Amino acid sequence: MKIGRNDPCPCGSGRKFKKCCGDGGVIGLMSEGADKPIVVFKKGFVINQLRRDAPRIAESFDRLCDNDLVVMDKYASRAFMLILTGMKHAEQNSHDVRATCGQLLLNALASWLAALDLLRDGFILQPGVLLRNMIETLIAVLCIFGDAKHWAAFQADKLKPEGEVGTASKVFPAFGQLYGFLSGTFTHVRKTYANLHPIMVYESRDYPPLDANINTLRITLWLCYVVAELVYHGVSKGFYWKALGGNAFEYVVSEKGLAMQIELLGADPAELAAETPKDNA
């Protein structure tokens, strides 16, 4: 199909083609028949998403999820402070394992923040990939903190956290449940990826994919905090662990720890993980 520069623009604007879609930005046209509307494809797929659409989507997310953001910010900030304080303490005492755990924990927290940012920009499937990476990083932390053989394997770059899910699940069953859910739904391509997931402005906080992603962000943040508190037990007043001597600890939830779970999770973490939809997209 050839359109003259002075012909009406096929997009239906009523303007001449040269003053509308024919301004140099058109890369192609698509028509399904003589009586069907013509679809005009223009440059800007990436730039429009980043500069035009993303800010509008982020504004809708901030408006609908303000309460969620306030609560998650509170505990993410606490986790960040605990990790940095613990790393400083470990470096001062030449404790290489705890110092390395701190670096891993900071990267886990960065993956969590990146997942939140993707969700804020309207991406539904992609946050789960990053959160699975976060869980895998936390598994690595538990392994090298709790066992000298794992530490040696990590130093030799031979530790495979994906094969140690069972080890982490002995600490918290939620690790195995979340790892399996995130792997099966997001990391490995399933029929979920064959569904259309438009990147669009959020209309309701009750939108199921949004709600499921927020719940997953909450529980992974809580897991990060609890693992950080284990690694840096004694650096600050803890809520979840009781030292038994040596490198042994018992998971004991204090009143403040329970209050934190209720505020951040709204339920027992194992129950929340079990109730996570099999397909949150």
Image (tube, grey):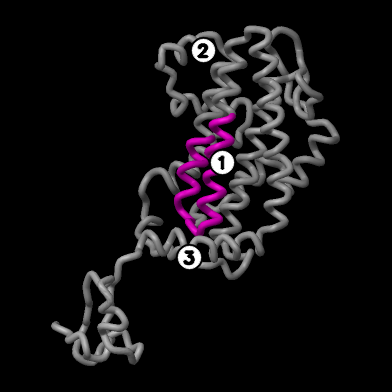
- Of labels 3 and 1, earlier in sequence is 3
User: How many other residues sit within 10 Å of disc 1, few (<14), some (14-19) or many (≥20)?
Assistant: many
Q: Is residue 235 left or right of residue 193?
A: right
Q: Earlier in the sequence, mark 1 or mark 2?
A: 1
Label of residue 66 in the image: none
Amino acid marked by disc 3: Asp
**With respect to residue 139, does 42 lie above or below?**
below
Q: Residues within 10 Å of mark 2 (few under 14, many from 20)?
A: many
Amino acid type at image mark 2: Trp
* Residue at image mark 1: 112
Q: In terms of image quadrants, where is residue 25?
A: bottom left
Seen from the viewer's position, the closer of residues 56 and 25 is 25
Report, in whole angstroms, how far the alpha carbon at label 1 lies from the one at label 2.
24 Å
- Closer-to-camera residue (98/169): 98
* Highlighted range, magenta: 106-134
Front of the two marks 1 and 2: 1
Q: Which residue is mark 2?
A: 151
Marks 3 and 2 sit apart, C-alpha to C-alpha, by: 45 Å
- Residue found at x 45% / y 63%: 199
SS for dot 1: helix
- Which residue appears at 63% of the width and 65% of the height? 206
Which residue lies under the disc numbered 3?
53
